[in-house]
Image (spheres, helix red, strand yellow):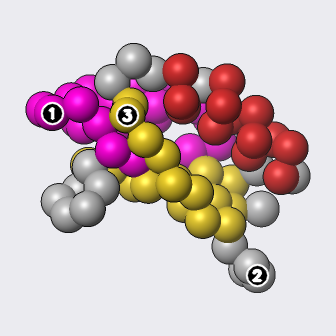
Amino acid sequence: MRAYIFVKTKPATSLQVVGRIKRKVKEVVQADAIYGRFDAVIIIEAPSLDSINEILYKVIEKDPNIIHTETSLVLSS
């Protein structure tokens, strides 16, 4: 299962957040700091929705520089 996680960070911290998430989460396929409505996008692949939920709530959202996340799940691959 694949998920796109759109992230808003505290000002000037998006590159730090992306680097930290890449190191901490082995399920990360890609993570980039971006311009626009969100500051970063993280793509993860995990075996189940429960796994994605655990990664999102126990690792990604615990980062002190993350203000908000929005997750979109891929319907089919």
Q: List the residue tagged with mark 3.
A: 67
Q: Nearer the viewer, mark 2 or mark 3?
A: 3
Chain-order first, disc 1 or disc 3:
1
Residue 62 vertical placement versus 19 (above, below): above
Q: List the residue tagged with mark 2.
A: 76
Extreme bottom residue here? 76
* Residues packed near mark 2 inside 10 Å, few (<14), some (14 to 19) or many (20 plus): few
Q: CA distance from mark 2 to mark 3?
A: 29 Å
Q: Nearer the viewer, mark 2 or mark 1?
A: 1
Q: Residue at x 38, y 31 (%)?
A: 66
Identify the amino acid type marked 2: Ser
Q: Is residue 9 visible?
A: yes
Identify the amino acid type marked 3: Ile
Extreme front residue here? 68
Q: Which residues are magenta?
A: 7-28
Image x and y of residue 38, in percent: 30, 55
Chain-order first, disc 2 or disc 1:
1
Image x and y of residue 58, in percent: 67, 24
Q: Is residue 12 left or right of residue 42?
A: left
Please say whether residue 13 is one of the residues in the magenta stretch: yes
Residue 72 vertical placement versus 28 (above, below): below
Chain-order first, disc 2 or disc 3:
3
Q: List the residue tagged with mark 1.
A: 11
Q: Residue at x 61, y 51 (%)?
A: 44
Q: CA distance from mark 2 to mark 1?
A: 34 Å
Residue 14 vertical placement versus 45 (above, below): above
